Amino acid sequence: MTATRVLVLNSGSSSVKYQLLDMRDSSRLAVGLVERIGEETSRLKHTPLIGGGAEEREREEPIADHEAALKAVSAELAADGLGLDSPELAAIGHRVVHGGLKFSAPTVITDEVLAEIQRLVPVAPLHNPANITGIRTAQALRPDLPQVAVFDTAFHTTMPESAARYAIDVATADEHRVRRYGFHGTSHAYVSRETAKLLGKAPEDVNVIVLHLGNGASASAVRGGKCVDTSMGLTPLEGLVMGTRSGDVDPAVVFHLARVGGMSIDEVDALLNKKSGLIGLCGDNDMRVIRRRIDEGDEAAALAFDIYIHRLKKYIGAYYAVLGRVDAVAFTAGVGENAAPVREAAVAGLEELGLAVDGELNAVRSDEARLISPEYARVTVAVVPTDEELEIAQQTYALVGNRP
Ligand code: ADP
């Protein structure tokens, strides 16, 4: 029997998201999520997608750690005849947030690879430890199976030094590996390729600005299929205004809050990562709620929206200049795919740059990639749904799927 299934695991500090795909047709066999691992109220949501059914099953019970979580997932999959012990499972693909400079491509996980991911923990203290736990747990469960790491940073390793380096003392930067790595790379790779497809062109022939606007948000400039700049930096904090992250601030804000505000470094870290962005500005980070509040005349929500759009527009302009010629601007992720007012406002006033949005096309709701610019526009504006799990599964399968 040929093994054609890939399990994709995205392990966070207290959660595991998973999808099981059949790579013969890239179809999903099951999707699910374990939340609040380590708490009394852990929850597992599992949806089998075989045999026409899509009935979600939900269990609330204490799940102590990642090992227990993966065992529970395995039991749910087994109940649908999709167990992890199946010979049809070809590999497990892991989302790994930080691959540093070493990993520019998906990589079969060996002890050395795991040690390198561990070595990167100081630059990704929130994410890499959880990814490592997920990998170790999956290895223990299926030691015979290839496990592949797909890195969030990989797509950005093509950035030139001029974009990747901060203008700080080189020796200090190098000693502490301080540079711009970028994140959401799996999404930027997938969306830039899908955008080329939508234009009927090869990725090598198009320049795209990708705007990944989810709860975390980042922009990238992609020239001929290769990333040349992206808005996140050493960590995912830099760049756009996000759900709870500030994005760009003068670094002196940190010194000021420490020296004058008496805040500790950990407090400033929490402030900028968790209590800033949209939630810091208006108390909500869900764009649906913010739009509703704006419709009701709420000024704080309106200002938060304006700040969000102002930053986004600055990045569109900056990446236009970086690329010189832009063929398409692609909106993706939760906000980018669903929030028509964000797309309209981000592009408003940029007609001189060849950018425009058609009101009617922009109002269409769909899961499909689609154009939203009028025919006369020089630059195509598109909505291109991202699919990071599919991209991870495809990269994993391409690497190990056809091994005997
Ligand atoms: P994550 O970064 O957590 O993967 P997503 O890409 O799923 O985030 O995006 C989540 C965000 O998308 C929500 O916080 C919300 O702001 C936004 N969103 C989701 N659906 C809609 C919608 N219908 N209209 C406007 N915004 C939406």
Image: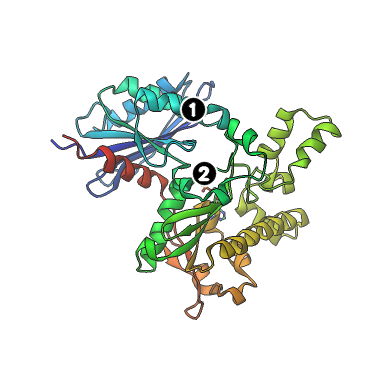
Where in the figure is residue 351, as x and y percent of width and height?
60, 76
Q: Residues within 10 Å of mark 2 (few under 14, many from 20)?
A: many
- Mark 1–mark 2 Cα distance, whole angstroms, equals 16 Å
Which residue is drawn at the image coordinates 51% and 77% (left, top)?
377
In the image, the residue with mark 2 has its CB under 8 Å from the nearest atom of ligand 1: no
Q: Residues within 10 Å of mark 1 (few under 14, many from 20)?
A: many
Q: Secondary structure at mark 2?
A: loop
Which residue is drawn at the image coordinates 32% and 21% (left, top)?
141
Task: Name above or below for residue 228 compared with residue 177.
Answer: below
Task: Name above or below for residue 142 compared with residue 174.
Answer: above
Which residue is drawn at the image coordinates 47% and 69% (left, top)?
327
Q: Amino acid at mark 2?
A: Phe
Q: Nearer the viewer, residue 319 or 395?
A: 319
Q: Nearer the viewer, residue 267 or 322?
A: 322
Mark toward the start of the polypeptide (1 vs 2)? 1
Where in the figure is residue 130, as x and y percent of width and height?
49, 27
Does residue 178 show up?
A: yes
Taking the image as shown, residue 137 lies to the left or right of residue 243, namely left
Which residue is drawn at the image coordinates 46% and 64% (left, top)?
207
Q: Residue furthest right?
A: 260
Q: Which mark is residue 130?
A: 1
Q: Which corner quadrant holds the C terminus?
A: top left
**Toward which corner of the image does residue 254 lie, by quadrant?**
top right
Q: Amino acid at mark 1?
A: Ala
Label 2 sits on residue? 183
Where in the figure is residue 145, as x and y percent of width and height?
26, 27
Q: Nearer the viewer, residue 153 or 28?
A: 153
Does residue 368 show up?
A: no
**Toward which corner of the image does residue 268 lie, by quadrant?**
top right
Task: Name above or below for residue 86 compared with residue 376.
Answer: above
